Image (cartoon, rainbow, N blue to C red):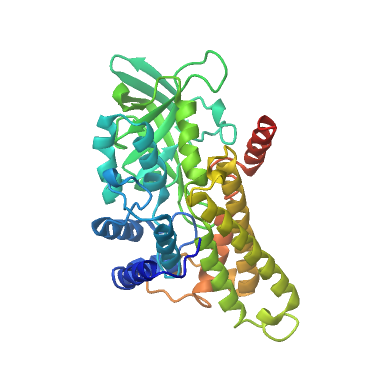
Amino acid sequence: MDLDSGPDLDAFRREVAEFLDTAPTDAIREAGRKTTSVFAPFDETMAWHRILARKGWAAPGWPVEHGGVDWTVEQRFVFTEEYCRRDLPPLLPNGLKMIGPLLIDLGTEEQKRRHLPGILAGDDYWTQGYSEPGAGSDLASLSCAAVPDGDDYVITGSKIWTTLAHRANRMFMLVRTSTAGKKQQGITFLLLDRLDLPGLRIRPIVGLDGFPEQCEVFFDEVRVPQSARVGAENDGWTVAKHLLSHERGGSTGSPWLDRFVRMIRAAAAERTSPFGGVLADDPVFQRDLGELEADVASMRHIEELAISGHPIADDPSFPSVNKTVNSELTQRLTTLMARVSGLEGLALQLDALGIGSGTAPLGDDFDLVSMPYYLNSRAASIYAGTNEVQRDLIARSLVAGR
């Protein structure tokens, strides 16, 4: 795609740039600068979500009839490019990019009416209840049970790595409703529209980066109406795979990677190399950054093909390819950030990372975020299905296509 020419596209780019330059508050921009994860600081990001929703730009990828925007493929990519050029936090993905699209595709009309407006407006935040202490990468082994009782299910068990559950007011989850047949069978997909239910308890987990992003969630005979089920009982594995296709392949990651590549290049121009001179002139650093930039550019090309309607997007292995490449590029990028920051980035500065704290960081903002982002990104090759599992799915797809 040619994203740089054409009067209509140029006018659209100016409109987007003007809005993004004027609409965010200082706190929202600070949250963008201090983002160290896929999940940006919660309060400021949800406030920004609501601003975008009032503009009508919160969910460009949704169908227009559900609140999406009637943009061309080129306009959507321009919006993402302009967004990533500024100090703006990425919107939290669970609602807009995961459960929202799933309900649009597979939800009942009642479920769409009940849940989509709150997701779009930023009034609701959904956490994902998938992994369990004994069922992480092998999600089909989950055991959190839901037993039918009248018009309800009674849920007993636990979930772990439940991102931002302590800040959420909604949850979508997988439960075991039968033990017959293969382990992928007997799984059901449920929606919880309250997290203050009797018997439900949430315990945050502090990660390596010092933040309580993940949580444990415990269910002690929690009652949920059977009308909250998406799809048929015992067919939740099919529903979950559909949602994972959105999580793994439903976004453009290269503009976000480009943003951090630019940050690395700018920081390296100001840092001294251990071997003398400026780090940006060091041949080893130039090689490593050049290889990363080339791979990000390749990822950008693949994503442009996918969103422009190329058959590559219909390949069953594409979500796994997209997830694997993006996560590994993120890990390489954050490793290079940590190298550039060096000793200045080693201190854990939780007070300085707080939005509005007023605490001055040691070093600059690049040093402040480099190590927490590096530590958080170690999980990138695990979440949304480990990269080993993704490579297995890719191989199976190739064998099946012969």
Q: Is residue 211 left or right of residue 296?
A: left
**Residue 354, can we see it?**
no
The image shows residue 341 at horizontal and vertical percentages of 61, 73
Looking at the rendered structure, the number of numbered marks drawn on it comes to: 0
The image shows residue 177 at horizontal and vertical percentages of 44, 19
Quadrant containing the C terminus in the rendered view: top right
Task: Answer with the quarter of the image where residue 367 lies.
Answer: bottom right
Residue at 59%, 52% (x, y): give it.
Answer: 327
Task: Answer with the quarter of the image where residue 203 lies.
Answer: top left
Q: Residue furthest bottom?
A: 277
Residue 368 or 46: which is nearer the viewer? 46
Residue 350 or 94: which is nearer the viewer? 94
Q: Is residue 344 above or below residue 383?
A: below
**Residue 391, can we see it?**
yes
Residue at 38%, 41% (x, y): give it.
Answer: 101
Residue at 64%, 34% (x, y): give it.
Answer: 397
Residue at 66%, 83% (x, y): give it.
Answer: 272
Residue 253 or 384: which is nearer the viewer? 253
Q: Is residue 374 above or below residue 222?
A: below
Q: Is residue 203 above or below residue 147?
A: below
The image shows residue 121 at horizontal and vertical percentages of 26, 50
The image shows residue 119 at horizontal and vertical percentages of 30, 45
Q: Is residue 25 left or right of residue 3?
A: left
Q: Residue furthest front?
A: 6
